[in-house]
Amino acid sequence: MSATAVDSSYLNQLGEARYDWTVAEVRALFALPFADLMHHAQRVHRQHFNPNEVQVSTLLSIKTGACPEDCAYCPQSVRYDTGLEREELMEVERVIDSARLAKSKGATRFCMGAAYRSPKAKQLAAISEMVRGVRALGMETCATLGMLTPEQAHELKDAGLDYYNHNLDSSESFYGKVITTRTYQDRLDTLQAVRDAGINVCCGGILGMGESELDRAQLLHTLATLPKHPESVPTNQLVQVAGTPLNGVAPLDPFEFVRTIAVARLLMPHSHVRLSAGRTEMSDEMQALCFLAGANSIFYGEKLLTTENPEADHDQQLFARLGITPEAPSLCAELSDHEHHQHATDVEHVAHHV
Ligand code: SAM
Ligand code: DTB
Ligand code: SF4
């Protein structure tokens, strides 16, 4: 079926969570005139979220570089000479100190990233201690450590992990051109293990790797037809790094990036869609369009894992110019009165900050 030959009655039902999307329906959303697509995305976004609130996460690379995988976009793969210094797994206390600092600057979720294919038992034990320590600060916790077995996912759940990030990156067919050392099914298996352990799923992809619009539609289709939608959908724009095979690919039309955010918002109406890597290459106006399209989460702080992110000051000004305030962490409900009060104070503090 062509992208335009879809019965458009489903447009009236946008806003309800559905798990039976067809690729043709997804493509028809991509094919809408920009103004119509943005209108639908805005309408649906406002059904489920406060459009003036954005969730704020901070990333820390707890183990950097020398990764055995061959992801063609990644500066941390041992196979590409990107000039990155490798660093061993950080000390638990240093990670908790870093989370404390991120919290004092207004982040409510702390995401720990490690350049592993999959963590070993000893590494996971140390990371579980980090998760315990960060959560004890009253922050939401997130980790991205590569593939997990069901047992490892349970170990992280027991430590108090709130979210696990594991991306599909692209469509299944384009994925094969970018990564050869693990399969799409491996990724789906890890997502299943995370879901079964009761951890929230953070799963998205990278745009601007030279993929087609069909690849972007298929990626979103796969995400939106999982048994449960990921709670968080990171939408990364490729950060081009010298030495990686994808350095030098033609950049994506910014409107295509915004369209992809809008379609993600429509397909997964209850999910947080994160405007993730690549913001340093985006204008403030482009980022505002992404928020209008339904993006409602960002990484905050000068560094992503190994590459630059906008300066915190700049993001504070952007939020102030757009009237955006940081969203309170959802674990508030589980906190004691004292911690709850502390959160209210923190959020007020960030609102001043940001
Ligand atoms: N090693 C683990 C893994 O790949 O699952 C966790 C860390 S890895 C860096 C997390 C995600 O960062 C990748 O799945 C990819 O989507 C994203 N990423 C890595 N390099 C990127 C780049 N240059 N630009 C945009 N996103 C990138
Ligand atoms: C995700 O989807 N994006 C973040 C996070 N998950 C871990 C990582 C972006 C990394 C960008 C390249 C770097 O800084 O090394
Ligand atoms: Fe390793 Fe993750 Fe980078 Fe792939 S994306 S090379 S698995 S750190």
Image (cartoon, grey):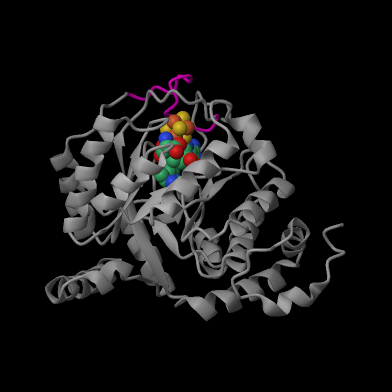
Question: What x and y, as percent, mark residue 280?
Answer: 45, 48
* Rendered view: 347 above or below 57: below
The answer to whether any part of residue 198 appears in the image is yes
Which residue is painted at 69% across and 53% down in the image? 217
The answer to whether any part of residue 238 appears in the image is no
Location of the C terminus by quadrant is bottom left
Taking the magenta stretch, the answer to whether it contains residue 78 is yes
Numbered range of the magenta stretch: 72-85
Question: What x and y, as percent, mark residue 14?
Answer: 66, 75
Q: Going by the image, does 27 lie left or right of 163?
A: right
Taking the magenta stretch, the answer to whether it contains residue 65 is no
Which residue is painted at 31% across and 71% down in the image? 328
Q: Nearer the viewer, residue 234 or 230?
A: 230
Which residue is painted at 51% across and 48% down in the image? 236
Q: Going by the image, does 312 lie left or right of 132?
A: right
Q: Going by the image, does 186 lie left or right of 112?
A: right
| Total numbered labels placed on residues in the image | 0
Question: What x and y, as percent, mark residue 52?
Answer: 43, 75
* Rendered view: 126 above or below 278: above
Question: What x and y, as percent, mark residue 79?
Answer: 48, 19
Overall secondary structure of the magenta stretch?
loop
Q: Nearer the viewer, residue 177 or 98?
A: 177
Which residue is painted at 87% across and 64% down in the image? 5
Q: Nearer the viewer, residue 147 or 212?
A: 147
Location of the N terminus by quadrant is bottom right
